[in-house]
Image (cartoon, rainbow, N blue to C red):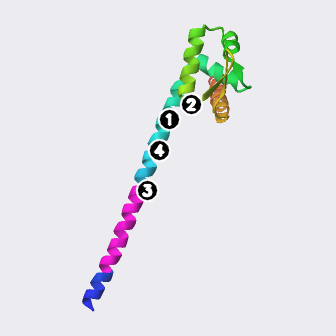
């Protein structure tokens, strides 16, 4: 009888240990997933860290544009435009397609437009608050 009680107790401890290991493994996996998200977020934020690239994203928020049209609208060189496109494309926020000699750009994800608009609203609110008289 005593042996049976100890066996039940051992089985119960094994189940608890297995459950704890499963929870720890799931937490570790979630943290690893979070780390990947943070790394990708940092990559995108680095791509956003230039006024010219933000202008490109703003224009592309209105729809697809040719690279030469973007270059003309921003008043930058072909080389600079190519660098900006490359950075935004490698961050996964810009997509390109070729039609003959012309390259067209568009946002890879519609959420990019929303993210940029949200950041602009936050900045506009900060500017408004910094310009309002203190009571």
Q: Residue at x 39, y 66 (%)?
A: 19
What residue is pinned by disc 3? 26
Q: Give the secondary structure at mark 2.
A: loop
Mark 2 or mark 4, whichever is nearer to me: 2
Q: Give the mark nearest the N terminus, 2 or 4.
A: 4
Q: Give the mark nearest the N terminus, 3 or 4.
A: 3
Magenta-drawn segment: 9-26
Mark 3 or mark 2, whichever is nearer to me: 2
Name of the residue lying farthest toward the front = 100
Residue 24: within the magenta?
A: yes
Q: Residue at x 52, y 34 (%)?
A: 41
For the residues labelled 3 and 1, the Cα–Cα distance comes to 21 Å
Q: Residue at x 43, y 46 (%)?
A: 32
Name of the residue lying farthest toward the bottom = 1
Image quarter where the N terminus lies is bottom left
For the residues labelled 3 and 2, the Cα–Cα distance comes to 28 Å
What residue is pinned by disc 1? 40
Q: Position of residue 130 (x, y in %)?
A: 62, 24
Q: Give the mark nearest the N terminus, 3 or 1.
A: 3
Q: Give the mark nearest the N terminus, 4 or 1.
A: 4
What residue is pinned by disc 2? 92
């Amino acid at each position: 009888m005593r042996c049976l009680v100890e066996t039940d107790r051992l089985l119960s401890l094994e189940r608890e240990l297995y459950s704890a290991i499963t929870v720890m493994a799931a937490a570790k996996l979630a943290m690893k997933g979070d780390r990947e998200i943070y790394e990708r977020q940092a990559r995108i934020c680095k791509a956003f860290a230039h006024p010219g690239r933000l202008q490109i994203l703003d224009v592309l928020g209105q729809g697809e544009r040719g690279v030469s049209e973007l270059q003309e609208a921003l008043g930058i060189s072909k080389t600079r435009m190519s660098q900006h496109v490359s950075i935004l494309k490698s961050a996964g926020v810009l997509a390109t397609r070729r039609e003959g000699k012309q390259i067209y750009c568009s946002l890879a994800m519609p959420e990019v437009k929303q993210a940029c608009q949200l950041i602009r609203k936050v900045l506009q609110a900060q500017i408004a608050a910094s310009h309002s008289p203190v009571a």
